[in-house]
Structures are given as C-alpha cells and as structure tokens.
Image (cartoon, grey):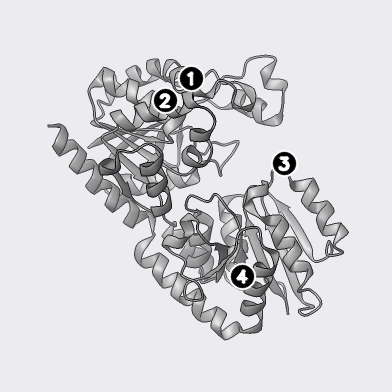
Amino acid sequence: MKVLVISHMYPSEFDEMNGIFVHYQVKALVEKGIKVQVVSPVPWAPFPFNYLSFKWKSYSNIPEQTVYGGINLWYPRYLTFPRAWFFASSGQRMYRGIKDVVKKIYQEFPFDLIHAHVVLPDGFAATKIKCIYHKPMIITIHGQDLYATINKNNNCKVAMNSVFKKADKIITVSSKLKKMAANGIGFNDKIMVIGNGVPFKKIIAEENNLLSGRIANSKIILSASSLFHRKGIYFNLRAFSKLVDKYPNLKYQIIGDGPEKNYLKKIAFDLGINNQVDFLGKLSHENVLSYMAKADIFSVPSWNEGFGVVYIEAMALGKPVIGCRGEGIEDFVEHKKTGMLVKPKNTDSLVEALDFLLSYPDEARVIGEKARSLVLENYTWEKNAGKMLEVYQEVLNNAR
C-alpha cells in the first residue's frame, strides 16, 4: 500500500517540534509495511518576506526535498498571507503550490490513497489531488479547524464543508472534536475517532534515565506548551504563587515559547515567584520528555484543546496530569483516577488539584501509575497506526 501524506505540520531541521505527532504516525505506519511519502507545504518567502521575522527567514531556508527520519519529504512553496488573511482561499493556493510536486511523485510512487492533516488548507488541496488521480482521501482533524477556522467567516465554513463532502473518511483525534465536527458541518457517518499516541521507545529510554539531573529535595511542576493565552500558563503561575509558602521546595518549570512569554515573566516577577519559576524556552522533543521524566506533576490548564499529546506523554512517564474539564483530554483523563480535571480559567480549582497531589504523594503516585498503564495499552503510535491501517484498507476496499 502506498500513501501520500499532505501536512503543513511536519518537522524540519529549523523546527523539529512542528507536527512531530504526524511524523511519529508516519514512522509507525512505515514500520507496519506501508510505503509513505510526505508533502509538507511551507509558505513562499521571497524577498522581502524572508526578512520579516525569524520564522519567515526559516521558511526560505527549508530545502525543497530531503529525507527526514528515514521518510521521503517534500517542502513545496505556496502563497500565504500574514495573519491568515484570505484564509478561505488558502486551500486553492496550497493546491497550486503542490500540484507539480505531486505529479512528479506519482510518476515514481503511484500512491493508492491520500491522507491529509487539517481540513483547511491541506484537506482542500487534497480534494483537488483526489479528483486528478481518482484516489480515495482521508482527512485528520486535530482541533484548529473546529476551534478557529470554522468560525472565521462563512467562506471558511463553505470551504470546509466541501472537504467534508469529498473526503472518504474523516478522523478526529478526540470524541469532543467528533461531536463538534458533526454539529458544525455534518457527515457524521464519515467521522470516527482515533486518538494520538506516544513514542514508546523514547518513553522507555527516558524512564531508564529518570533520576539523572533531578533537582534534589524539590517538588517540580512542569508545563510544556506554546505560550498562548488559551494554554492557561497564567493560571498555573497564579496557583503556584498560592502554594509556595506551604511547599517551600516547590519549583515550576515552563517549556515553550510564544507571544505571552514576556507577559508571563512579568507576572512571575510581580507575584514574587520568579526565583522558583524557570522559563526553559523551546526545546527538542527528547529534552521535553527528559524534563517530563524528572517532574512530579504535569499541568497545562488549557481550554479549546482538541487532544493534547503532551498530556499522554507525561502520563506514559507515570506523571499525574492536570487539564481542563470539557476538553478532548476527557477521552483519557478521569478525575482522581488517571489525572485531575479542573474548571477552565479558574485559579481556585487549579490550586485545589495541585494541593491534593502535593499533599498526598501516595495517591498521586497511584494516579500516575494508572495513567501510564492506560496510555501504554491504548495510546502508543503503534496502536494508532494499527487503527489507521484498518481505515486505509476499508477506504480502499470501498473504492474498488
């Protein structure tokens, strides 16, 4: 079986964390005998756009083609606009950017089906490819489509509807997203849930190095996320400030970067906790897992969360995690059994959850152990690839 994956979310040498979950799924599929080539469109960044920011300069430095982690990877350019202007037509522009590359790929790699990640723009571009090569097409929704894109304007919703109509199967990574997709656009008979996974081998490697570099006599709360408001790091800082006097050896480590970084540093200073809070910046995936292994609690009280791979990675390392009620994480986090669920945007609820885990370390350890068992039994990339392979076979059988 030969699969063409289309995903603008995919790692490169300039951003190893971008779409790392898509890469892990692709590698797991390859290990099951599936032949895969990946098209990962990147914004066209000619002069003077390549001097707008470090991000745009990085786009211009990404090679047209490479092999990443053993996967054949193509990075065609397509026209985008700052601040997602004219986003409803982004799928059409992506198609124009990738069609020649896909034609070249097909000459030596006549793919059997297309798997796109994100409805707009990737899924829209994939529907155009589907029509040319008459191949079935699958789309995976990770969250942004339903939390943001569908609400931008009616043109975006119309474009998304056309993708849903033409897709042979729609995958959502959580039950919440499935409900949102069915209510927002329809086509419920096409939608199924396949949760993301964890890289089992890397998890085991970090468990073997668990005590290396551990801060002595301390309790460590960790978060790992982009530093956007909806990730809830502000509420972590507020809750942490209310607990440092009760737990004098408490530390808070923040992995990630984003537009709120300087604001959050100021909040930590204003709360008088800047000496107990470490902003670690953006790290490689291996380093993220290493910090997770040494932490005591993982807390990202994020809302508008489609799934949250970082939660199951922390759980796989035996950590009690804290997330918000009503989000995609409820597929695998059951309150006080496999983690802690708190009210969104509520400092007091977060303080209560953190205080419980810190006050009752034996209960916290049991929660972490149950979480680890749950994830390793149900949420590895190997399990994910097995479910995806069944979908591929079903779609191909229906297309014959």
| Residue indicated by mark 2 | 159
Q: Name which of mark 3 and mark 1 comes first in the sequence.
A: 1
Quadrant showing the N terminus: top left
What is the crowding at mark 2: few (fewer than 14 residues within 10 Å), some, or many (at least 20)? Answer: many
| Residue indicated by mark 1 | 89
Residue 9, horizontal then vertical, whole percent: 49, 37
* Disc 2 + disc 1, Cβ < 8 Å: yes
What is the crowding at mark 1: few (fewer than 14 residues within 10 Å), some, or many (at least 20)? Answer: some
- At label 2, the amino acid type is Ala
On screen, residue 24 versus residue 221, left or right, reads left
| Residue indicated by mark 3 | 259
Q: Residue at x 35, y 49 (%)?
A: 28
* Disc 1 + disc 4, Cβ < 8 Å: no
Instruction: Report the Cα–Cα distance between label 2 and label 4.
Output: 41 Å
- At label 3, the amino acid type is Pro
Residue 8, horizontal then vertical, whole percent: 48, 32
Instruction: Report the Cα–Cα distance between label 3 and label 2.
Output: 29 Å
Q: Residue at x 49, y 54 (%)?
A: 309
| Residue indicated by mark 4 | 297
Closer to the observer: label 3 or label 2? 2
Closer to the observer: label 1 or label 4? 1
Quadrant showing the C terminus: top left
Q: Name which of mark 2 and mark 4 comes first in the sequence.
A: 2
Q: Residue at x 50, y 77 (%)?
A: 367
Q: Quadrant of residue 61?
A: top right
